[in-house]
Amino acid sequence: MRRPLRYQLLLPLLTLLLGVVGISTWTALASAGRARRQIEEQVRNVAHTFSDARFPLNDRVLEQMKLLAGADFVLLTRDGPRATTLRAEGAELPPAGAVVENWQTLSLGPRVEVGGEAYLGSGVRLPPRADAPDGGTLYILYPETLWRTALWEAVRPSLVLGGFAGLASLVLAVGVSQRLGRRVQELERRTRLIAAGDFSPMPLPRRDDELRDLGQSVNEMAQQLARLQETVRKTERLRLLGQVSGGLAHQMRNGITGARLAVQLHARECHDGGDAEALDVALRQLALLEAHLKRFLDLGRDGPIRRRPCSARDLVEEAVTLLRPRCKHGRIDLRWAPPGEDATVVGDAGQLGQVVLNILTNAVEAAGPGGWVEVSLRRAEDPSSVVLIEVSDSGPGPATDVAERLFEPFVTGKPEGVGLGLAVARQAAEAHGGRVSWRRDGAVTRFRIELPTA
């Protein structure tokens, strides 16, 4: 059975409210009983005073006692009424059962009426005295209005305090449950929107509590889901692009291979009288395109990597050789000094060569005409089992809007770029246990390729 959160919050508070009401009622009843006992104690003290009196009991004395006790008195002897504070004729006296022999057992008796006014009456036998040999009976009539007023004054603080506390608890319980219920409903609505694909953040409440933390967690989850959705979308685009471009690259490679063979045959026929330099440049460009397509096809293949020992210096040397004609044509100073000590890495030479070629191509494009690109190869000092290939260029560096996402697919700051070169390079390097990173040192952009040695 469904139990809404607001009812779960209200139930303990309502239980507390019932407890407050019960305690207030008990306190009021206790206060009423205490007030009754005080009044009866006062009446007994008056009876005690009359029982021990050595002075004559007359109307004047009774009037003075009325001022002190607030009750009316009737002194009845065998010969009839002797003294009274009542002004009305035909007073109704308490029954014989309300008359006690000892003042210590005196209590407020039944209700009687005198002249239209209600009293609580009782009586006590007085001992004989000189002026009254038979003693007589003293009837004490306590006004019911004073009795009710005393009781109300006794129970009013408890009732008012209990009622105010109960009402405040009820209002607080309803308010808290309504507020928390609305906030929980907003969280529920927000999660439904996220399930429907709306990942926009929800406004957080100003009150810093657990529900605000939950809302913050929901927003963070929505951001992660948005990034995940974007990654899935890009991955799907990359997969489709790989399927289409794989077939296209295969056809282009066949065509370029045929064109290169035709140029080579033409170069042999025109060896003595043709333009050998122009044909050599054409062959180099065709070889570069063929190498790009071959390595692109290698990266697109599924299955385990073909790991073989290969020379890191040869990988860099091959990439520099392929790009040197382009740098010469674009007046870009390509600096490469092969180190004396080589390093051997284990992996697919085609994929590792594509990593170096993509990073170096990116640097050449960034440097532009009149710029420079420098390539270095060395072992890392710590750990020594890592070889570092660093490519520096004099270009302006990545734009600020793409700098943090430079290695994501389809992210590029070039007007005609696709955004796959650096993404493919990082993917291939990480597949071989290495990594690719970049930093900006002043006016120089440096890309670093780290590969584990054999």
Image: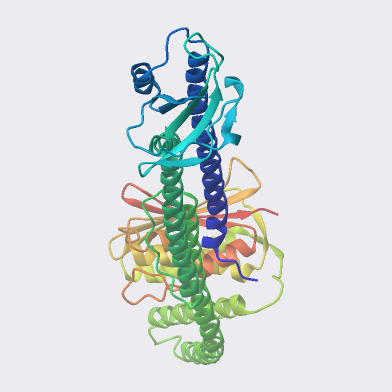
Name the residue located 40 percent from the left edge and 62 percent from the top edge: 363
Q: Does any portion of residue 407 appear in the rendered image? A: no
Q: Residue furthest left?
A: 370
In the image, is residue 348 above or below residue 44? below
Q: For residue 61, what is the image quadrant?
A: top left
Please tell me which residue is depicted at 36% across the width and 31% down the height of the picture: 86
Identify the residue at image location x=37%, y=23%. Answer: 66
Along the line of sight, which residue is nearer the eye, 436 or 62?
62
Q: Can residue 452 be seen in this view?
A: yes
Residue 34 placement (x, y as % from top left): 52, 30
Does residue 428 sit above or below 444 in this rendering? below
User: Is residue 264 found left or right of 205 in the rendered image?
Assistant: right
Q: Nearer the viewer, residue 245 or 361?
A: 245
The colour scheme used to paint the residues is rainbow
Total label count? 0
Residue 429 on image: x %, y %: 58, 62
> Measured along the vertical axis of the image, is residue 22 above or below residue 370?
above
Pick whichever, 244 or 83, lies toward us: 83
Screen quadrant of the N terminus: bottom right
In the picture, the quarter occupied by the C terminus is bottom right
Q: How far across and how far down the image is residue 318, in percent?
A: 53, 66
Q: Residue furthest front?
A: 79
**How far across and how far down the image is residue 449, in percent?**
53, 56
